[in-house]
Image (tube, helix red, strand yellow):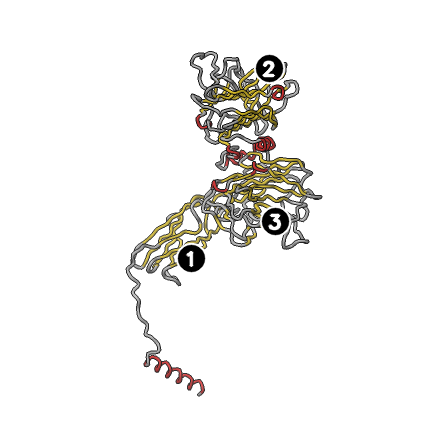
Amino acid sequence: MKILRLLVAFTFLIAVGCDEGYIDEITAVDPGADASSPVVTIIYPVEGTAIQVFETVTTINIKFEVTDDIEVQSISLILDGSELTNFSNFKDYRRAVEEYEYDGLTDGDHILTINATDIEGKTTSESVNFSKTPPYVKKYDGEIFYMPFDGDNIELVSVTRPTVVGSPGYAGEGKVGGNAYAGANGSYLTFPTTGLLGTEFSAAFWMKVNATPDRAGTLVIGPPDVANPDSQNNRTSGFRFFRENAGGMQRFKLNVGNGGGDNWFDGGALADVDPTQDEWVHMSFTISGTQATVYINGDIVRQGDFPGVDWTNCDIISIMSGEPRFFGWNHRSDESFMDELRLFNKALTQQEVRNIIVDEGGTVGFQPEFGEIFYMPFDGDYTEQSSGASATQVGTPGFAGEGLRGANAYSGASDSYLTFPSSALENNEFSASFWYKMDNDPDRAGILVIGPPDGANPDAQNVRTSGFRFFRENAGGNQRFKLNVGNGAGDNWFDGGAAADLDPATATDWVHMTIAISGTEATVYIDGAVVSTNTFPGVDWTDCDIISIGSGAPRFTGWNHKSDNSFIDELRIFDKALTLTEVQAIKAAR
């Protein structure tokens, strides 16, 4: 009876409310004309996704979104021309966010097509190309870990997935493949270090640097800091590779724990990356039992000896953050992009690092530190790395079969040299830096020359009113290095006398040479020390169109400064006058 009375009372209230206008009647709203076709967004797989797992047949979780201005009626998923499934019931009829798990994906190339139709029959079709490739086969000697980040965080050597902290994402672009890791605030990946740690270790990867935040951890294997759980910074074991602001640049540094303490590998300005360039940069570091080296774009930016790495209590690797083991100095999540992360159980050589860069579509060696505009490493060819152009060979220059860096160097020969167009090199300021192993036969030679033609003396050219001439001559049994620079009206000499001498009997190893020309002075450096400097009116480049490498010919032969039989390696040219500090930094990065 009590329930009955309640029902009667409720019915009475509804009737009275409706009769007295307390509750509005439901009124239909015209949604308007169906003006637009559906919009289809395929979330996964994206264009170029490459799926690699051990299984020959695997499962793929297809994710997509469809929106329409009025109503989505149906969605069809088509793989390689055959329909997988069809959706027609949606909780939100204007926006469908759906997933479909397909468990029959085989090796090969595939095309996924999604067709979406709205209530008036307008259809939109979107497609992506992707592939399932056979199980990953290690590509390089010593490779123990590989993450391509192509829309998935799977590690392909062990086929395992990381622990994901926060919400890292994908870049929508990659140096290799269709995607890359995209860092996010408070986000990173971790893996157990089982099987990764030995007496030697190397890492190689690509980064597109985001300067926000202005310091971050990039790759860390470190021990817990139980004394400082909220500000961990125990550096006695493992390593920390990270970046910090350096006057607007991002400077990369490596710290390695040796058991009793830690060792620093800080390349200073050589290890700087300009984040405003929005370019992929190759990073690598190697750790052996006696030495650690940091490379940027295949160049050594810091190298030094140390007692060897200690791995005590190092049980995880953090990717794209210093957390959770290295954030005492606020090196937390890195919001940059990362691609093609590889780890090795050996200390890679520089040539191995460069081979990886080339394999992955990069250019080795060249980087615009200190205004660098020209770079020839002479590693088996005469290619200038920033332009990709090759020098013109005169005679039969060769290769040394050794190099200060890399596998080779230029080897001079009688009546032989290289030339290269010089117009792009002729600026108000100019510097050249290279390594040199001297052969004092002949006892005078041109080394590096940009000069004008001497039409009046074609067989003994010696116009010195423009360009420069860097050369050597016998000086009482020694070889004396001199610089001559044309100022337009005449020429200026930079002759350091005995300070610029090398004794052929003792100078049998590689020596670092630099010339620097500003608008007011010129300086000659040998092994990072000033051997000659003076003021002058500034360089003139009239009629200068080629640079000669390894000879004074063809523009500076009047005093018999012809081909040089010496070795030359790592020739770099800059559009500024290098400072002493910069010269020494370049020399130290040998």
* Residue at the left extreme, as displayed: 33
- Residue toward you, 421 or 203: 421
Q: Are the residues tagged 3 and 1 within 8 Å (C-beta)?
A: no
Badge 2 marks a residue whose secondary structure is strand
Q: Nearer the viewer, residue 563 or 531?
A: 531
Mark nearer the N terminus (2 vs 3): 3
Query: Earlier along the polypeptide chain: callout 3 or callout 1?
Result: 1
The number of numbered discs placed on residues in the rendered structure image is 3
Q: Position of residue 276 (x, y in %)?
A: 48, 42
Badge 2 crowding class, 10 Å Cα cut-off, few under 14, some 14 to 19, many 20 or more, is some
Q: Amino acid under label 1? A: Glu
- In the rendered structure, which amino acid carries the disc numbered 3? Trp
- Labels 2 & 3 near each other (Cβ < 8 A): no
452 and 283: which is toward the camera: 452
Q: Quadrant of residue 36?
A: bottom left
Q: In whole angstroms, how far apart are the C-alphas of marks 1 and 2? A: 80 Å
Q: Quick check: 313 left or right of 51? A: right
Between circles 1 and 2, the one closer to the viewer is: 2
Q: Report the side of 276 relative to 443 (left or right).
A: left
- Asked whether the residues under the numbered discs 1 and 2 touch, taking CB atoms below 8 Å apart as contact, a structural biologist would say no
- According to the image, label 3 marks what residue? 329
User: Circle 1 sits in a helix, a strand or a loop, which is it?
Assistant: strand
Q: Residue at x 42, y 57 (%)?
A: 98
Q: Amino acid at mark 2?
A: Asn
Q: Is residue 317 above or below residue 287?
A: below
User: Which circle's residue, 1 or 2, is located before the other in the chain?
Assistant: 1
Q: Residue at x 54, y 31 (%)?
A: 578
Quadrant of the image for the C terminus?
top right
Q: Which residue is mark 2?
A: 474
Identify the residue position indicated by label 1 in the image. 98
